[in-house]
Image: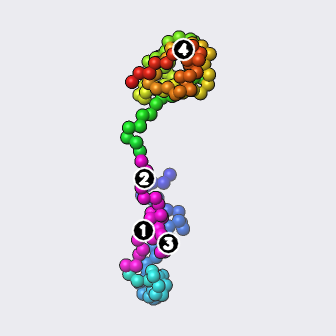
Amino acid sequence: MHMLHTLSPAPGSRSKRIRRGRGSSAGRGTTAGRGTKGQGSRAGSGRKPGFEGGQTPLMMRQPKLGGFRNPKRIEYEVVNLADIEKLSAGTYSVTDFRSSRMVGNKKPVKLLGRGSVTKKYALTVHAASKSACAAVEKAGGSITIVK
């Protein structure tokens, strides 16, 4: 069993740091690995982050404006006619949809016309599409819009 004070790295896993610019006898003297003349040879010659050799940098090529986000946009929870068709005929309101977990609790509810309806429903929702209204009324039901 090894004690903590006897632990050491595996042989060959750690190599000594190269000390550049410490005389020519050290093997890394004179130019210290920077080559001769040229852009990177002088002190203080580092290029700024994102520099792409004179090509227009990526950050400058990006679109400048972020578009528009409507602050008054209303996001609805969606109920489709196909979802309602699974229920038995009768009267349903937003609270009924929420208690049956068809929709979440926070957003207003909108009825959309995907699917078809054959039973008679009296529905109370916050909004409904024209096709959904037409389909429910065609089946003999009614839709009430509440704010």
Name the residue at 58% across, 21% down: 135
Q: Nearer the viewer, mark 3 or mark 4?
A: 4
User: Around disc 2, counting alpha carbons within 10 Å, would you say few (fewer than 14), some (14 to 19), or many (20 or more)?
Assistant: few
> Is 61 a magenta residue?
yes
Residue 49 numbered mark, or none: 1
Mark-to-mark CA distance, 3 and 4: 66 Å
What's the magenta bit mostly, secondary-structure-wise? Answer: loop
Q: Which residues are magenta?
A: 44-68
Where is residue 7 shown, x and y percent of the image? 46, 58
Earlier along the polypeptide chain: callout 1 or callout 3?
Answer: 1
Name the residue at 62% across, 16% down: 118
Mark-to-mark CA distance, 1 and 3: 14 Å
User: Around disc 3, counting alpha carbons within 10 Å, would you say few (fewer than 14), some (14 to 19), or many (20 or more)?
Assistant: few
Q: Which residue is mark 4?
A: 141
Q: Nearer the viewer, mark 1 or mark 4?
A: 4
Q: Amino acid at mark 4?
A: Gly
Residue 55 numbered mark, or none: 3
